Image (cartoon, grey):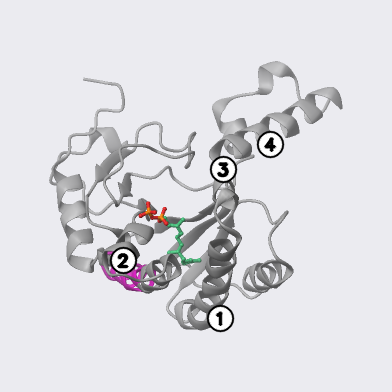
Amino acid sequence: MREQDLTETERKIPDHVAVIMDGNGRWAKKHGLPRTEGHRVGAGRVREIVEKCLELGVKYFTIYAFSKENWKRPGKEVSGIMKLSEVFFNREFNRLKSKGVYFVHLGDTENLPPFIIKIIKNMERNNAVERKLYLNIAFNYSGRSELTNAVKQLCTLVRQDEIKVSDITEDKIESFLFTHGMPDPDLLIRTGGEMRVSNFLLWQIAYTEIWVTDVLWPDFSAEVFLGAISDYRRRERRFGGV
Ligand code: FPP
């Protein structure tokens, strides 16, 4: 049965939830703390929400941890995020792996510091066998860059006569995205109150339900997450139909 044919009660937990974790800087300012402290508390929330996803049976959880545009931030903040990410990966990878969390990096390794590239490669090599939950971490990610890259790869295949222009379908394009083979997000949560998508998963969110909260990411508790899920369950998804 297609998802659009399910009734409201049959539609249960979203398979794929994506999150734009915004508001760490404002949270830190509100508490008179350096911005990096907001990111540190925010990283702790990732752990809590991943646990909730496992409990609920969400299959894919995608977080926007660092965009290509974030390089424009002050050097001290960027290096703070890199350091925090290193701590997060070192502390959480094995623990989450043992619970069936399969790690996926969305983004380019180019320009990332060598210690982060090393951690990403190591996690990819030693990934979980059981895949209860895919944890997609968008890190050095940009939706436009992902699409540009897909176009380049398709053009190369056409030029090499491996495919014809008429072979370029939506599925073909999808196969060149970092999320290839995964379902599109059912629900996109943005914390921090801004009403924009910030170059996140541009192709994948075509029919995604969007849920925005004023809650700042470091305050985003499991309870707030459950509120987003229950709102989602009341939404009527029509996928362009009636
Ligand atoms: C947006 O808040 C947040 C980020 C750009 C960084 C998010 C990074 C983490 C939570 C670190 C954890 C990393 C991993 C790998 C789990 P903002 O600084 O734009 O907030 P503002 O809009 O209030 O300034």
Height in image: 133 above or below 174? below
Q: Which residues are magenta?
A: 45-57
Q: Residue 13 in magenta?
A: no
Pick out the residue farthest to the front: 32
Answer above or below: position of 11 versus 48: above
Q: Amino acid at mark 3?
A: Ser
- The amino acid on which the numbered mark 1 sits, given as a three-letter code, is Asn
Q: Disc 1 beta carbon < 8 A from ligand 1?
A: no
Give the quadrant of the C terminus: top left
Q: CA distance from mark 2 to mark 3?
A: 23 Å
Q: Is residue 210 visible?
A: yes
Mark 4 in CB contact with mark 2 (< 8 angstroms): no
Task: Tell me which amino acid carries mark 4.
Answer: Asn
For marks 1 and 3, the one nearer the N-term is 1
Mark 1 secondary-structure assignment: helix
Q: Residue at x 33, y 44 (%)?
A: 186
The residue at which mark 1 appears reads as 90
Specify whether 113 is left or right of 239: right
Question: Sequence order check: which comes first, mark 3 or mark 4?
Answer: 3
- The residue pinned by badge 4 equals 149
C-alpha distance separating marks 4 and 2: 33 Å
Q: Which residue is under mark 2?
A: 218
Ranked by sequence position, the earlier of labels 4 and 2 is 4
Q: Of marks 2 and 3, which one's residue comes earlier in the chain?
A: 3
Q: CA distance from mark 1 to mark 4?
A: 30 Å
Q: Kindly identify which residue carries mark 3.
A: 142
Q: CA distance from mark 1 to mark 3?
A: 25 Å
Residue at 59% across / 47% down in the picture?
68
Residue 117 lies, in percent from the top left, at 69, 66
Toward the viewer: 127 or 23? Answer: 23
Q: Secondary structure at mark 2?
A: helix
Q: Residue furthest right?
A: 160
